[in-house]
Amino acid sequence: MRRFFRRRATAVLGGAAVVLAAACADFTTEAPLEGDVFDGPLPGLTPEELAAFVRGDEDFGRAFSPAEGLGPIFNNVSCASCHSGDGRGRVENALTRFSQAGSLVQHLGGPQLQDKAIPGAEAEVLPAGVDVSVRLPPPVFGVGLIEAISEAAILALADETDADGDGISGRPNWVTPPAFVPAMEPGGGSGPQLGRFSRKAQVSSLLQQTVEAYHQDIGITSDFLPIENQNPLAGSPTDAADRVADPEISQSTVRAVVHYIRTLAPPAPGADTPERMRGRALFVQLNCSGCHVPQLMTGPNPIAALARQPVTLYSDLLLHDMGDDLADNRPDGSANGREWRTAPLWGLRLMRQFLNGDAFLLHDGRARTIEEAILLHGGEAQAARDGFAALGPGERTAVLDFVGSR
Amino acid sequence: MRSIALLAGAALLLVPALKGQDTTQAAPERPFVTGGVYDKPYLTRLLGRTALGGYAEAHARLERADGATEEFGFEAKRWNIFASTQVSDFVRIAAEVEFEDGAEEIKLEFAAIDVSISRQLTLRAGMLLSPLGRFNLAHDSPQNEFTDRPLVSTELLGVALSEPGLGVLGLFPLGATGRITYELYAVNGFDDGLITDSPDGTRIPRGRGNFEDNNNSPAVVGRMAWSPRLGLEFGVSAHHGAYNVFESEGTPVDQKRMLTIWVFDAEVEAAGFRVMGEASTTSIDVPSGLRGIFASGQRGFYLEAVRDFGRGWVRTMPRSFFSAGGRIDVVDFDRDLDGDTIHRYTAGFNFRPTRDTVLKLNYFRGTVRDRFNNPTEEAGFLFSVATYF
C-alpha cells in the first residue's frame, strides 16, 4: 500500500474501509417485527401461496392514473390509498353510502357517492332526500380468517329473539351476492348467503368486495364488472372522459388481490400484563364479550394456513341494534338503520401507528378514543356501556388497556 | 401570445444596454454557467470549429427499505455525447444526446443555436435546457459530488428538463469580479401528464416531453443569477404556464390550468468548502374533481457541502485528490398533507484521479412517508464511476 499511497492516505482509506464494513452490517434498515404490521402474510403459507401473495400485494398497492383507467368518477386511486398500511382508513378517506327507503337509487348515482372525477368528467354531488351513511374504510387484514370461520360457528351465536334474556339479540345478515360471484367461491351462490364483511355485514364474498371496490371506489372495470360506473346526474356523459378500453383489469388481477387479502395475517395482540388480565376479566364481566366474542374457529379450508385456526377477532360477526346515537337510519341488505355488525377489535394496538397518531373508531370514525367509542354504544350494548361507565377510574383504565392492546 | 409579448418586452428593455457595445463575440473569462453547456472538457476538436465529447457514468447500488432489499445490482446509468460548433463569430450550436439505463431511454437533451449579438444579448432557439435552478443547467455526473442527483431536482422538477423553445440570455458585468446573468425563454411547457399520467398524485416530471405544445399556449421559463465573484452565486428561476388542453378547435373545453414553479439556488465557496443548495416551491391548479388526491402545492430543497483534500496523496496520480461531504434532501409532494414526503441524508467520499473523473462512494439513509404519513426507512450504499471523455 505504501508504495502507492502516502501514510495519511493509507490511514484515511483504512478508516473508511473499517467504517464501511461496520456500516454494512447495521446501517441498512431493519424490518418491523412480525406481528407489528397489518400487511404480513399468514404463517404457514406454501411457497406458491406466498408467490401469489406477493403478486397480489403489488396489485393492491397499484395506484391508477387517469391514463390507466382511473375513474371517470371515483373516490381514491388504489386499494392502499384508503386502507392505511392495510389497516383502517382516516375520516378523510371515508366513503359516503346513500340510498332511499332501501332502494340503491342507481338512477341518482347510488349506492356510493363518488366525489372525485378525472378531467372531463363530473363528480357526483349528494342528491337531496336520500338516506346517508358515512363509512370508514375497515381493516383489510384477517379477512381470510373471517371468511374461513364456519357458518355454523357464527350462527350458533345468533339469538334473534333474545331467548337467553341477556339483552343481546345478534342476528345474521342474509344477503344475495351478485351474479358474478360463482357458487364455488366462498360466499357465492344463487341463494341468500351469510354476510360477514363490511360495516353491516352486507357482503358475503371477498371476491364481491374486491370487484366492487375496484369499480365503485377507483372506477376500475374488470372482467366481473366491465361497464364503467357513471354519474347519471351529470350534464355530459361521464364515461366519455375515460378513454381506456374496458375491462381495465383482468380477472387474474382481481383474483390476485383477493388471494392477497385472504392471506393477510392479523397483527399479534400485545403481551398480557396483570393490568390487561384484570381488564380482560372486567370485559367479560360487563358482557362486552357477549358481542365482541374473543375467539372463533375456522373450518376446513383449501389453504392450510386458514384451516381449523383460532381467530381472535373479538366479534361475533352478527348484527346488533346499537341504539339511537350510532343509528344511520339507512337499511343495508336486511340490516336496518340501527344495526351494525360487531366490529372486530383486533389491530387496535397498532391503530394510531398507522393513522399518523390519530384514532378513528366506529363506523364513521367519529370516536377518537376507545373510551369515547364505548360510551357511544347503545341499544343492545347499553347495559355493557353503563357498566363500563360505572367502573372506577382504575378499572376503566384496565378495560381500556386491555381493549387497546388487542 | 403573452409569453411572446414578455420576451419581446425583455428584448426591448435590453436595447439601451446594447448601445455602444462591441458586438463581436468576446470570450468571457468565466463560463456563462460553470459546468454548463459551453463549459465541458471536450476531448476532440475538429478543424478548430467543432468539439466533441461526452461523459459516462456507471453505478453499483445496494438499496434497502424496512429491512428488505429493493435493489442490489449494477446500472450502465448514462452515456452522453455532446458536440458544439462555432459556426461563425456570432453563431454557435451545441447538442447533447443521452443514452440512459443501457439505452432504455435515448433523449436529445440539448440542441440549440445561439446567435450572439453581444455578451448582454444572445438569441437561443432549439431544444433548450430549461433554466430552472442551477442544477438543471449543470448536472453532468462527473461534476456532481454525489451519485444520485438531488431529489428536489429529480422528483419535483424533472431534471434533466429539456424543452423546445426560443429566447434570450445574457450577462452584465458588475465591478471587477461580479456579474448578473439571465436566461428567459418561451417554451412548450409541461403537459397534463403531470396529473393524467401520474398514479401517485401530482408529479411534475410526468408532464415533461411536451415536444409539440399540447395546448398551443407557450410557457415562460427564466433564471436570473447574481454572482459577486467566482464561487459565489445566488439565482432565482421560475417556470409558468398552462399545462392542460383548455381549447379544442376553438371550443373551450376547460379553464386554463396554470403550473408555476419557483426555484432558488445558491453556491458558496468559503473556508475550503463548497456549499450548494436549491429550494423549490410549486403551485398547480388541479381540476376540482381531483383535489384532495392530486397535490396543488409541492416543495423541497437540497443542501450539500463538500471539501476537497488529499491532493497528491496517491503517489502514482499526482493530480488526484479526495473529497468528502454530505447532503440533505427534502421533498414534500403535497403541502396539504403531513405525509407524502422524502427525507434523505447522504454522506459521500470521492476520489478523483483527475478533475474530470470521479469515483464516488455514498451512504444514504432516509425516510419515505406515504400519504398517511406511514414511514418506510430506507438506506443504501452507492458506488459510481463517472468521467468526461
Image: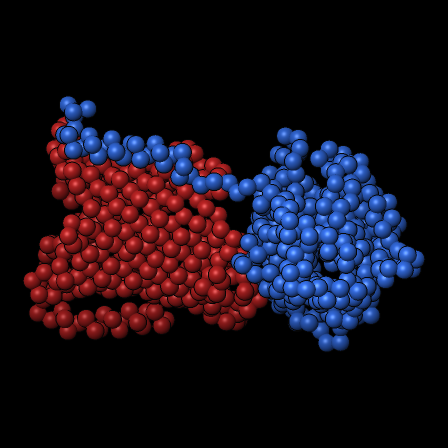
- Which residue: 27% across, 64% down? B236
- Which residue: 76% across, 76% down? A129
> Would residue B41 be found to the left or right of residue B166 on screen?
left
Q: Nearer the viewer, residue A187 or A395?
A: A395
Can residue B197 be spotted in the picture?
A: no
How far from the left and from the top, in percent, is residue A60? 61, 47
Tell me which chain appears blue.
A
> Would residue A61 be found to the left or right of residue A135 on screen?
left
- Image quadrant holding the N terminus of chain A, namely top left
- Which residue: 90% across, 60% down? A165
> Would residue B363 be found to the left or right of residue A83 on screen?
left
Can residue B68 be spotted in the picture?
A: yes
> Would residue A251 be found to the left or right of residue B277 on screen?
right
How far from the left and from the top, in percent, is residue B238? 33, 65
Which color was chain B given? red
How far from the left and from the top, in percent, is residue A331? 81, 65
How far from the left and from the top, in percent, is residue B55? 27, 39
- Which residue: 38% across, 49% down? B344
User: In the rendered image, which quarter is residue A234 located in?
Assistant: bottom right
Residue B35 vertical position relative to residue A119 in the rendered view, above or below? above
